[in-house]
Structures are given as structure tokens and as C-alpha cells.
Image (cartoon, grey):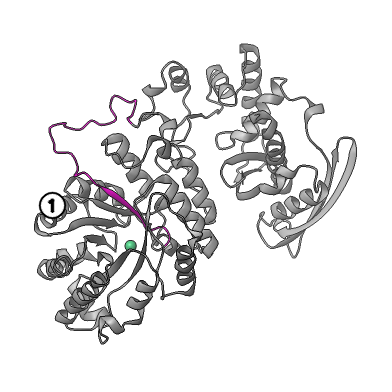
Amino acid sequence: MSTTSTSPTASGRDASLPAPRPGLDLYDTTLRDGTQREGVSLSVDDKLRVARRMDELGVAYIEGGWPGANPKDTEFFARAADGQLQLANAELTAFGMTRGARTRAEDDPLLQSLVDARTEVICLVGKSWGYHVDEALGVPRETNLAMVRESIEYLTGLGKRVFFDAEHFFDGFARDGAYAREVVLTAAEAGAECVVLCDTNGGAMPWDVTEIVHGLVGELSCDVGLHFHDDGGCAVANSLLGVEAGAIHVQGTANGLGERCGNANIFTILADLQLKRQVPLVSGAQLERMTEISHTIAELCNQTTPSISPYVGHTAFSHKAGLHASALAKAPDMYNHIAPDEVGNRQRLVVSELAGRSNVVLKGKEFGLEVDDDQARAVLAEVKRRSAEGWSYEAADASFELLLRRVAGLLSSAEEPFRSLHYRVNVSGGDGEALPGDGPAEAILAVEVGGERKLGAGEGNGPVDALDHAFRNAVNGTWPQLDRISLSDFKVRILEATAGTDATTRVLVSSTDGTEVWDTVGVHPNIVEASWLALSDAYTHAILRVDWKA
Ligand SMILES: [Zn+2]
């Protein structure tokens, strides 16, 4: 598979401009900066898994965390050094601070922990904004320079390769450029292999970045790297401009994880540079795994890849309009900026009441089904009838696939894996208005499987969770594939009553096997029934997809 885009407009750039310097490296800081995101907490095993996936993608460096600063990270490096992390592509790096203000480098316990982490590369962070030195660190500025210099000299003296993260560099440069420059020049002179200009507060703007990075690239005797946060929405743009200005080391995180608005998204940077700028960073085969790797890492972090994420998001190559659909059938590159399979994603067509028959036919193709005109007409009529009741399949591909198969006669009632008989749900202390997910709930549920009645009970947080447990208990062991599948998200929307209709509820459920995500929908005036409809589609899809894929 070629790594160049099929789109003629993919790189609308002036070819006379100089190319980025060769030897550009991507540096992944998911395991350190990325885990600052609220709600993300990785076990040591999960950290090892994330590192393996980023290595498979082909980044040059993986920062493992702060050895010595927290026990989990110390254990991570110990296990990595013990052979539990075999990296094929990346160099593992340890992260830590420059020496304390009142200790000698050789006596500093945290620097010693960095040495003990047994990585060849160490990334040291130090202050480069005078204001922070004065107020946060509370030491004379000369002392901060000595801390930077002596920490780097000590580690390089032990044969380590040292990168220097200049914290708050862009803010420091704006307020007190002379001192910020002095700090990074000191780091370079002390032997840092790369000085990384960090936009720690994330507010740097592209028009400043180009000039500042260009100036430093000319001034520093070592490599220049970049570390952007996305508070101004420019982390990826700033990274790309910094590369144009001569930086050859770019830091980012998987899916842009990181505190506040996140770090620069390393996946977006990788695809932008490789597909639009022809900078060879990873192999074509590695790039084709990027979508899968993005979703797996999100899962390990108990998150989902945001659906609008460039390249890897669920909707990154989705098309809704009927006009697009018929044109897409003829020439997919008319409406996609790259071929989705270059990054392991796929084109999706969204079927709504606005759709034409060509949407249904193309959508069928996505599922590997040949749908004729009569079938498409029947499916469309059913979609329109249901949309009047509040059903929407735009975010529920798996339910749409079931609807299409049922209406087109491709899934008979005899082939349905189970039939719902009845259920009852109690929400403790609820007043009947409780939303799914609210408070403890109990469910009892009966289904028929192969002519046999199966009964199960379950408890959970809210009715969706309780029904999920009850169903799994009822059919326990019937379909082993269900064990690997979990509900990753659900959304509830109350649809307003309109003339001639009562208020109704739409529930969307996302399920995952850890790699793929599929979405189902249920609509009913009763919120619990709407939840059950979405859940039963989720199970049916999970059970049958094994055969459909075969
Ligand atoms: Zn950061």
C-alpha cells in the first residue's frame, strides 16, 4: 500500500519551499502527559499495553512516566527493564525534573531514580519562564540555570542521551525572551541532544510559533523539539508549523489525551506529515493500523476516540447527503480528502429520512450485502415511517444493519438468536422518572432461545446496566462472544411532544469488543423499553456479526 494520498488536492503546497529536515522523530507522551486527562488512570499492565501499541504504530520515542515520583511508574520501568516490554521501533524514555535547588545533581534522589530506570534516553523538564522561577520555584534565576546545566551534565556524564523540555517556553519567551533563550542555550551547551520548546499552557498561536522556532533552530547547537497543548485549538497546527520552521522532534499523545483541552494529537500529526507532506515516519502498513490503535488505546484509557477525530474518528469519512451518496458510488475521492483505508478507517454512509435509494444500496455494500431496488425502496419506506416516530439511524449503524436485513428479508424471525418475552425493572428510591444510569436498579428478564425459556436477574447502576446483567445471566454461556463485549456508552434523549405525538425517548447504546465499536438505537415513550430495544439490537448484532463477518 502506497503512503501517498490518492487525492489530487491532498498537498496543495508550493513545491519550491524547502522540505522538512530529514530524521524527524515522533515522541509519544501518552503515558506521562496523556494520563493527566481527568478520569484516565492506567494500571502498570495497561501502560505496558499502550506502549506496545504505540511501538507497533512506529513512533520513535515512548515516554513511560516519572520513575521515582510515583510507585506505578517506578514499577513500569522496572518491568520494562526486566524484559516485559520489548520494543521493536521505539526508544523508551524516562521523564523527570532537573535537580532540586539545594542538592547536588549526584545526590538528587529523583535524578538517581531516572538513572535507575535504565533507559538510554532521559527527558528532563526545567523552568524557562522567569516568572515561574521567581514565584513557583522561588530561587534566583542563576540557580535555575545551574540546576539545568548540572543535571544535564551529570546524566550525559553517565552516558545518557538527554532531551530537555523547556517548560512554559512560549509564555516565557513572550514575557521575558532573554531569560527563556538563556535557559535553552544553557541546556544545549550542557549537552542536551534536543531542546524541546513546550507550550505548557497551550495558548501559543501559529503566527508566533513559526518565527520563534525558526529563530531558535538557527541559534541552538542541538536539535529543536516541540510540545504543544491544545488550549487555543492550535496544538496540531503549531506542531506542523514548528516542523516547517526546522524542528525535528514532535511530542504528542494518542487521541490528544492530556489535561484541560489535551495535548497535540500524535495521530493527526503523523498522518498530516506522512500523507500531506510526504515525510516518511512509519510504513504504510503501520499507518493502516492507526485507526485500530487509536480505538484500542482509548479503550484502555476508559474513553472512546471522539467520533470527529481527524483520520481515526468514527465519522471521519461519513457522508449523509443523498447527492454525495450517488457521486461517492462513482468516485470516492471526490468527497474524501484521503482514501480512508490508508489510515485503517472506512467510509460510511449515513442513512436518514433524507436518504435516497442509492444511500441504502451503498450502505448495504458496506455491510457486504447486495440490495436490489425493491428492497431498497421497502427499507427506505420503513426508515421514513420510523423517523416520524423519533427513530434515527444516523448514529446507529448496527441497528440500521439489522433493520435492513429484517425488512429486505435477509434475517428471518427464525434466524433471530433470541426473542424477548418480558422483563421488569425496579429503580431503588426512584420516582419513575429516573434516567438510565441513575442509582441502583434491579431487573428480571425472560427470553426465549431455541424454543427454551431462560430467566435471569441482575443488579446495576440504572436500568440499562441492570438489564444488561439480567440478560447475560439469563443466556449465560450460550454465546461465548458476548463475554468479550461490553457497553461502552449510552445516551438518552427525550424528544419533545409535537402535534399528534407524545413525548418519546431515544436511547443510543455503544458496544465494543475492545477494538471495534458499534451503535444501536431504541425509541419508545417508556425509557426502559427504549433502553431494552437498543440493548437487544446490541446483543443481536454482537451474536450474529461473527457469522456475517465469516
Ligand atoms: Zn505538557
State which quarter of the image contains the C terminus: top right
Q: Nearer the viewer, residue 193 or 130?
A: 193
Q: Which residues are magenta?
A: 4-31
Q: Residue 276 magenta-drawn?
A: no
Q: Is residue 214 above or below residue 506?
A: below
The percent position of residue 454, horizontal first and vertical second, equals 87, 45
Local crowd at mark 1 within 10 Å, few (<14), some, or many (≥20)? some
Q: Secondary structure at mark 1?
A: helix
Name which residue lies at 62% across and 25% down: 384
Q: Residue 14 magenta-drawn?
A: yes
Amino acid beneath label 1 = His
The percent position of residue 297, horizontal first and vertical second, equals 49, 51
Residue 517, visible in the rendered structure: yes
Residue 167, visible in the rendered structure: no
Q: Which residue is under mark 1?
A: 214
Q: Is residue 177 above or below residue 369?
A: below
Q: Is residue 354 left or right of residue 175?
A: right
